[in-house]
Amino acid sequence: MNNTLEYMALANAQVAFDVEEFGRQVVALLDDSEQRERMGQIARQRIENELGRAHTHKQLLEAYAWLFRQIRAPRRARRRQ
């Protein structure tokens, strides 16, 4: 997933299908610089508007907080016994 996000952040075009379709799409992109540019810009916009750290850090911190609560809960229960 990180590679995908990095490619998107760099405005690099991506394709993902079964192996044969993937090969056809890669060849098509190699032949179409305008399509590569469009796809790259769409990916870049998704990083800037939806998937970048400025938009996801709150959810990440909440996930870590939840995880730490889960880890600490059994310890507290053991101390009471």
Image (tube, rainbow, N blue to C red):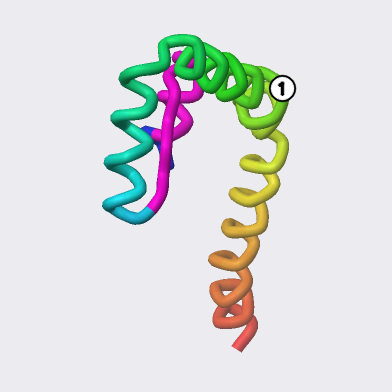
Q: Quadrant of the C terminus?
A: bottom right
Residue nearest the viewer, comparing 2 with 10 = 10
> From the viewer's perspective, is 22 left or right of 41?
left
Segment tinted magenta in the rendering = 4-17
Badge 1 density bin: few <14, some 14–19, many ≥20, Cα 10 Å: few
Which residue is most to the bottom? 81
Q: Position of residue 44 (x, y in %)?
A: 57, 18
Q: Residue at x 31, y 20 (%)?
A: 30
Instruction: Please tell me which residue is depicted at 42% across the width and 31% down the height of the picture.
Output: 14
x%, y% of residue 71? Answer: 54, 66
Mark 1 — residue? 49
The quarter of the picture where residue 10 lies is top left
Secondary structure beneath dot 1 equals: helix
Identify the residue at image location x=27%, y=41%: 23
Q: Quadrant of the N terminus?
A: top left
Q: Position of residue 31 (x, y in %)?
A: 34, 18
Q: Quadrant of residue 68?
A: bottom right
Figure check: 68 above or below 77: above
Q: Amino acid at mark 1?
A: Asn
Vertical comparison of 56 with 16: above or below: above
- Residue 13 colored magenta? yes
Whether the magenta-drawn stretch holds residue 39 is answered as no
Total numbered labels placed on residues in the image = 1
Residue 70 vs 34, above or below: the answer is below
Q: Residue at x 37, y 28 (%)?
A: 28
Residue 51 located left or right of residue 39: right
Give the x, y percent position of residue 67: 58, 59
Q: Nearer the viewer, residue 27 or 71?
A: 27
